[in-house]
Image (cartoon, grey):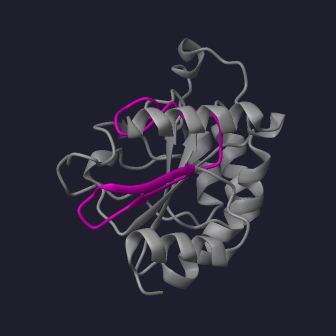
Amino acid sequence: MRRALIAAAVTLLALQGCDSVTPPEVDKAGRSDVDVDTPQLRKLKARTDVAACRPAKGDHVDGGLPDVTLPCLGGGKDVNVSGLRGPMVVNLWAVWCGPCRRELPIYQQFHEKYGDKVPVLGIDFQDTQPGTALDMIRETGVSYPQLADPQSDLSLKDPLPNIAGLPYVILIDEEGKIVDQRFEEIDDLAELEGLVSQHLGVKL
């Protein structure tokens, strides 16, 4: 019942959102042709300060991220997100999402200030423009690792709802369980600090 309510709430929020948070009309087959690791993309990534993707070490746990392996944006090691362990902040974003561009520098501030305690992971979600995504990462100064999910493989995989809009944030505890997830633009560093303190119990 709780998952159904979350899914309904996310869908309602997405429908009420502005065009900037609505994904482009691209069918799943079209998204499957998106290659996020090419020589050109590796060159673009080399112009950023983005950290390398690191393989997850844990096994899948009930209530954790689904058993989905995602490629590293711009080249690098694939990551099965079900093995991620926290405390961790996961931010889903895309180049077509205006609010995402506004909030990426906030996640970077959090990463710079608290990354040793609470790592941040970005996922370029439902995005068919990996080159533009890497340009956006460079322009916003982001340096935490970035995965890519052009096919929306995470969406509707229990315990995640239909992720119908962005930005989306997921908080993972030390056991790998999702303790909070929401369709929400983070307005400032204090808001993100509050979410982490409340749901992950980390003293920042």
Q: Residue 94 vs residue 88: left or right? A: right
Residue 158 is one of the magenta-drawn residues? yes
- Could you tell me if residue 37 is visible in this image? no
State the residue at coordinates (34%, 59%): 54
117 to 71, vertically: above or below:
below
Measured as percent of width and height from the top left, residue 141 is found at 69, 68
Q: Can you tell which quarter of the image residue 172 is in?
A: bottom left
44 to 16, vertically: above or below:
below
Residue 68 is one of the magenta-drawn residues? no
60 to 89, vertically: above or below:
above
Which one is in front, 133 or 8? Answer: 8
Which one is in front, 183 or 51? Answer: 183
What segment carries the magenta color?
154-182
Q: In which quarter of the image is the N terminus?
A: top left
Dominant secondary-structure state across the stretch colored magenta: loop
Q: Can you tell which quarter of the image residue 192 is in?
A: bottom right
Q: Residue 72 vs residue 63: left or right? A: right
Q: Residue 39 vs residue 54: left or right? A: right
Q: Can you tell which quarter of the image residue 129 is in?
A: top right
State the residue at coordinates (73%, 25%): 24
Measured as percent of width and height from the top left, residue 138 is found at 70, 60
Measured as percent of width and height from the top left, residue 114 is found at 50, 81
Q: Residue 120 vs residue 82: left or right? A: right
State the residue at coordinates (59%, 58%): 46
- Count of marks, rendered view: 0
